[in-house]
Image: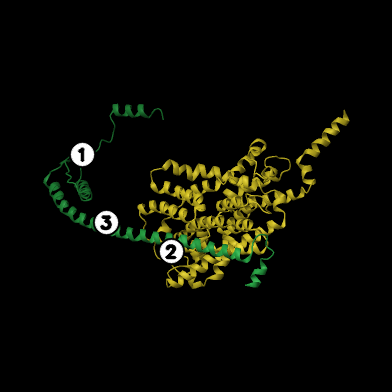
Amino acid sequence: MNLLSSLFADGIDMNFEYVSSVVVTGLTVVFLCLILLVIILFLFGLVSKARRKSDEKRAESKIEEKSFDLDSAKTQIVKTVPDIEDGIEEEIVAVITAAVLQMSENSGKRLSLKSIKAAKTQRTAWAAAGIIDNTRPF
Amino acid sequence: MIDKFLDTLVDLATTSGFAGFINNGGWKSLIMIGISFVFMYLAISKGFEPLLLLPIAFGMLLTNLPFTEMYHPDLWKITGEGIDFGKVLHNGGLLDILYLGVKLQLYPPLIFLGIGAMTDFAPLIANPKSFLLGAAAQGGIFFTFIGAALLGFSAAEAGSIAIIGGADGPTAIYVSSKLLSSGGFKIDTGTIALAAYTYMALVPIIQPPIMKGLTTKKERSIVMGQLRPVSKTEKIIFPIAVTIVISLLVPSAAPLVGMLMLGNLLKESGVCDRLVKTAQNELMNIITIFLGISVGATTTADKIVNKEFLGVILLGVAAFCLGTACGVIFGKLMCFFTKGKVNPLIGSAGVSAVPMAARVSQKVGQQENPTNYLLMHAMGPNVAGVIGSAVAAGVLLSII
């Protein structure tokens, strides 16, 4: 201790006690602050975990409800006979129906498929003129 | 007529910058210009912190070209009533005006705002224990304080040198400009900033040997588990909670931590896109240019070519090495207590220097096990180090 004190004897405004107090206080305060934050974040984590679990449970129960809705949605789709344009293949109808069914499952709403028509591949002259007019400034 | 012509030529020669190199120790300016070239080379060719090192190097070049009158060290001399800012505004050059932001401690908190807007604290929130590594790495600051005291530096000088160990440029500038504001010291903010940014640029060279020396091959090969997902609510509450806790415990750290957390809250809230973009880009870039060039301008030859600067350089590297070592040793302790679940290499990232230090942890880890990805685990202590160094800065400002 005396040896250490003598090392600092020539310092301008610092002695051994002062230096050691800065070091000990500094390290203690830094650790204290960050340990406090560790505790707060740990508690955050616990609350978040609990919330996530309850959310998962709620989601599970919703899925069960949805599966009930899904059945009715299926019935709805089967019940309605969509108006299918000539020339559209059965595979395409099956894919679109499956997509609508999936949408019913996700949204929990009853969706019905009323008609399937091929999109027009060519614009009418009026539509083409309108697009040219709108995009001219760019 | 010929006499007048010759007189004019002599006048031109004596008032030119070339004459300045010969008179009154002007050769020292040549050394400084040489150092600025080295920094430019490191920034451009080696890619070492180019965003800061290049403006610093250019500021250093400008200020050491004789008679450029862009920076006047005499204006910053502290008289009985402190710095005469009116005189600076009336008689100062461009770099004097820019340096006001350093002297008034404006730039560091604004840079922290930008850093906050760019930082993702999710790895830290997911693994709060990382905070301890960030705290341990601040050991370098306080142990270097002892070294500076032993070398005969005053308390304010020792505190300014020690903060280099935090590996955080803005924090080092903030602390040194506050501690050294009363004048009469052997070193100044420019000296500290130069040393801090030099070592930050050299992180990939300084850290790996210490990391390898303090860990075994087995420890370096540890693969850490996946981090848990962090909810948006947690990310929003985090900056608010940190600001309140740190500001209440260490009020003098509030400007740095507060701005860091404001930037982060803007980002995580998801409702201030324009402000976030400005903080991350325009504001950050403008302040970086101002800070770099004005800090570089303060490195005049008489302040750098002396034994005090040599002391700062030696203590700075000691601070950096000690900080890295403290982080790794604490990482080893955590590895021991968690029965090998923590790779001690992530401890070295506790010395701020975001994200360079985390990248070094990742690189050293992959040298042992190429399939090991420590980057996200190292980002936790890395961002904890930013908060830790700001707290350490506040502590130094409070005590000294």
SS for callout 3: helix
Left of A5 or right of it: where is A70?
left
On residue A117, which mark appears? 1
Q: Label 1 crowding class (10 Å Cα cut-off): few <14, some 14-19, many 20+? A: few
Q: Can you say which quadrant of the picture contains the N terminus of chain B?
A: top right
* Foreground: disc 2 or disc 1: 2
- For the residues carrying marks 1 and 3, which lies nearer the camera in this image? 3
Question: Which SS class for mark 2?
Answer: loop
Q: Which residue is located at x 52 percent, y 63 percent?
A: A27
Chain A rendered in what hue?
green
Q: Nearer the viewer, residue B36 or A130?
A: B36
Dot 2 falls on which chain?
B
Residue at the spot of label 3: A55
Which residue sits at x=85%, y=31%? B5
> Residue B149 location, x and y as percent?
64, 62
Q: Amino acid at mark 2?
A: Lys
Please state which of residues B386 and B340 is positioned toward the viewer in this rendering: B386
Q: Are marks 1 and 3 on the same chain?
A: yes
Q: Spatial distance from mark 2 to mark 1, Cα to Cα?
A: 60 Å
- Marks 1 and 3 sit apart, C-alpha to C-alpha, by 41 Å
Q: Earlier in the sequence, mark 1 or mark 3?
A: 3
- On the question of residue B125 being in view, the answer is yes
Indicate the amino acid at tag 1: Lys
Q: Are marks 1 and 3 in contact (CB under 8 Å)?
A: no
B20 on left or right of B103: right
Q: How is the image coloured?
A: by chain
